[in-house]
Amino acid sequence: MSRPPWFDLRERGILIAVALFWAICALANPMFHEESTYLSILREASFVGVAGIGMTFCIISGDFDLSVGSMLSLLAIACVAMVGHTGLILAVVLVTLLGAACGTLNGALIAILRIPAFIATLAMYFIYRALAYIVTNGQPVQFQERWFTAVGNGNLAGIPIPFVYLLILTAAGTYILRRTPFGRQVLAIGNSRRASEISGIRIARIRILIFAVVGAFTGIAALLISSRLWSANSGMKIGYEFDVIAAVVLGGTSLAGGKGSVVNTSIAAVFFASLNTAMNMFHVDSYMQRVVIGIVLLFAFSLNGIRSYVGERLRLRRAARDLGLAARRA
Amino acid sequence: MTQAIELRHITKTFPGVAALSDVSFDVPRGEVHAVVGENGAGKSTLMKILGGIYRPDRGEVLIDGQLAHIRSIHDSVAHGISVVYQEFNLMPELTVAENLYAADLPTLPWLPVLRRRPLHARAGALLAGLGLDLDPRALVKDLSVSRRQMLEIAKALRLDASILIMDEPTASLADAEVEKLYEIIRGLRARGKTVLYISHRMKEIFDVTDRVTVLRDGRRVGTELTSALTPDSVVRMMVGREVKRFSSEGPAASTEEALAVSGLTRRGEFEDVSFRVRKGEIVGIAGLMGSGREEILKSLYGLLPLDSGEVRIEGREVRIERPEDAIQLGIGFVTEDRKDAGIFPLMSVRENVSLNVIQRIARLAGLYVDERRERGILAEYTRFLNLRYASEAQPVMYLSGGNQQKVLLARALAARCKILLLLEPTRGIDVGAKGEVYQLMAELSRQGITLLMVSSDLPELLAVCERILVVWQGRITGDLVAGQADEAAIMLRATGTQAPLHGDR
Amino acid sequence: MRGPARLLESYFVYLVAAVTLAVFALLTPNILTGANIINLLTNAATVAIAAAGMTFAITAGGFDLSIGSILALTTCVLGKLVPHLGAWGAVAVALLVGGVLGAVNGLIVTRLRIQTFVATLSTMIVYRGLALIYTAGRDATLYANLDVKYFTAGALLGVPFPIALTLLVFLTAYAVYRWTPFGVFVRGIGSNQVAAQVSGIPVDAVLIGVFVVTATTTVLSGTLLTSQLLTGNGRVGLGFELEVITATILGGTSLSGGRGNVWGTLVAALLLTIIANGLNLLGLADPYQRLAKGLIFIVALALDSLLRLLRERRR
């Protein structure tokens, strides 16, 4: 009797928001009649969405990672530096592993030294940037291999390659969250640390693993972005962590932890990409864009509270009704 | 005589649940009035309506004959009502005096600068007047739990309210302090104050109250003079049916040893604890709050590290350093803190039940959770425990307390445990569900599972267990056969009044 | 848990500051010359003053991450308005703007029920956006404005103005923390917000007040900074919140709320400046200094949680 959640529109409010937003834009601006506009939105969404998948795990477990922007800069520099020597496959593997290593470091600070996650990662935010600056001396690094630009800029059967990555990784992320013991343990930790401890979950280990996952997904995002930009530097993508967290939160993952959806995070990333594209098309001043993003973020955060309030009430009513039915049947 | 409180047709509905329906009763001035009922009977809702936290959907409240519109805590206070809630509402980093008068700190007339001397004088006078030995300058975080509870009560009394509502005020008090509380309540009655007293404990109701109102399923069942009632008749009103008292016939005693511990010590909590438990035996652990009784079981489960001692399971020495080890060794654990350390509220019933064995039931090198096997486990325990839920995907937070408790049992049992450690297994669940839990424990014992339970409810221990270990100040002071012991025998040892019976050490 | 742990917790920062100073005094003898000491204190002022405000926010169990942006906005407001209103008039306007932005933070936290951390994370973006829009992303340079220079180069009763202002702010902060109902409320809310509510403390008003305090102290910091830079710019103060939070926590204000240490904050701000100054004198390049600051932050946090663990162990 439980229907698969991805068809359940009550859990997919964000999908409706995207559709509505596109409909409004299409009415107001003929650019939104072009297929290429949407393809470009999907491409841009992927650069945030990929890291958002990792961040979804983190926020579900009740933590935060503010260092992803700086980590991305460092990883992109590493990626650009090595891609000429390693080729694509090995570069993907190495940058993912390097990201996981950075994430493990974050996780260790948090789970072993017991520093609150958002503060520890705020510190790492500065450390990774400083490292990025030190290794490049503040200069941008570029790659010479033209084939590598295809990863971020190319299409596969008409679909932007980054979006292909996003689709595959969203599926993988959903599988990990819903169908592996690790995913269950992530949810369990987000629901109740103390109950998780009693269930024999090694909380510190799982938390470190979660930050490693964040790092790994950030690594793939770094690969895509550096290819897209043809270069990397220590000042790139400042504020990226906000975009990522905003997508996760707008996707309905509870800031209090315990539940969330990878698919919704990816859809929310598409929403933000649409918003950015629309603001550019309507010639919104770039500083004003920041203000708008900040306000949407605030809206998302408060929506989270309001929705969970309304949602709980609705669900409570539904549960009571179901229970009544079950009792009558018995 | 004027009525201090008159409740007229109070109705309060939460989505899908009628918490109170058409409840009316009066409490005359100067009366100590007990409100009793099972969990979910509506007592707390009623108190919260009087305290200004909830507003009733229908009905009215009259205070001293006047219609009262209580919309906020503030309104409630303005009507002379003061509430001692169950949860602690103290600020640990502030002093006793600052906690007492947080809303009403004395300042200089022309500058918002604190005047500490009058503050301490006022607090000191209040505490002395209540016979409480508390220093107004002490930080609350340095106080013991029972002293905090007394401070909580003092806080409710500071306003000289004419109506005092106490929600299970003795939950964390020692006996001497309960006596002190009785004194305070009697003093209030003598001064014409009205007290609404909510408690689960029959003894207190009969010790200190004048009349009793019984609620069941949000309705008032009756209001009687306490002197006209007996504990049995109160329980009958609460549940509306005869409760079958659980008899502990017990299975034929096995001689196989399931668990033996010797010299268990955790400094500051318990010391040199030794006992043996036979297979299928149900052993109770009795003791006052803070005696170390929970800590012993938590250490056995690997939640608290031991300083020294030896644990043997079926004769084999084992080391338990974390819960994971305990689960591997066939030990299950059910917490007393169901809400915060038991359930995973937002996860489904199915996910809650399978979590302890999630690694074991995974396929493909631990990379795939087989939902069919999960459903199998859930189906098995749904049948065995008579678990009720709307669907397997229902978040566990929406189940009743009794069903949540069964989910915890199912989770521990799913790991095929041989020894089950239970803390307060029937706390906060209704009488009907309690009976079911007792039956289950007997059934598990028949299947050869060994049970160790800590309970504050002595009649429960005497009814359910075969043997009762008594703990006092971290040491075992008694090892009693339940059939030959009574509450007095346990209390004598739990308070250190009588030396241990068995001089086997 | 009286005894060594609590003592260590209260005085730890003083010990560290003394040791650090001694080490740097050995490594670089000119750190202890009179001119350098004045220099140290002056440099510490910007972080210290905002940290005095932050001490209240963290004691109340919250955070204010938007202060870096408020700092930037302050430099912009002063850069734009000093030529028209004069230095004091412009500072008055900046204080007003800061107060309003702080109140907005407070209203978002109390009315929308968003955690302080994420709420101020959002306004951090918005406020910086406002600063950039206001100056159109350009510098608002103040050429040789003598009034503004007073805030760095001037003296009050013979004490250099930044040092005098720091002392004034900290004396006030200590008095408010220790001797006013507001101070009691802040500590009460930080140690148990629900209890504070039930006890009749006006929680929402106090929280709004706390954010106004962090914002206005930041405006004072921004005034000193503008006076040094003689320019307003929307990109100033990236990471300022981190330095300020570091100083506050290093100073002994507990992240778990309820317990602040005003003088500890001041000493910690000095300590950070001594370290920066020492690293400078040792000839370390800027990115390495930033790296060092991040690492010091981590160490401060690790110590904070270590002490917390110690305390829990005692229970």
Image (tube, rainbow, N blue to C red):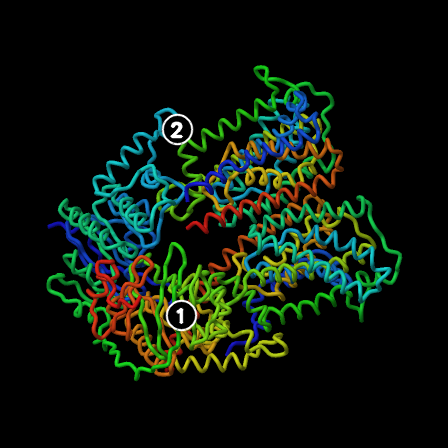
Residue B271 image-quadrant placement? bottom left
Pick the front one: B124 or B106: B124
In this rendering, is residue A248 above or below B185?
below
Q: Secondary structure at mark 2?
A: loop
Subunit under mark 1 = B
Place of residue A312 in the rendered image (x, y in percent of width and height, measured from the top left): 46, 63
Place of residue A70 in the rendered image (x, y in percent of width and height, measured from the top left): 70, 50
Look at label 1 and name its amino acid. Gln
Tag 1 residue: B404
Q: Secondary structure at mark 1?
A: helix
What residue is drawn where x is 45% and y is 29%? C175
Mark 2 and mark 1, same subunit?
yes
Give the number of callouts. Answer: 2
Look at label 2 and name its amino acid. Val
What residue is drawn where x is 52% and y is 36%? C212
In this rendering, is residue A296 above or below B442?
above
Residue C300 image-quadrant placement? top right
Tag 2 residue: B113
* Label of residue B384 in the image: none
Pick the front one: A64 or A313: A64
Residue A62 image-quadrant placement? bottom right
Q: CA distance from mark 2 to mark 1?
A: 51 Å
Subunit under mark 2 = B
Place of residue A316 in the rendered image (x, y in percent of width and height, measured from the top left): 43, 66
Callout 2: few (<14), some (14-19), or many (20+) C-alpha neighbours within 10 Å?
A: some
Q: Quadrant of the C terminus of chain B?
A: bottom left
- Viewer can see residue B225: yes
Mark closer to the chain start, 2 or 1? 2
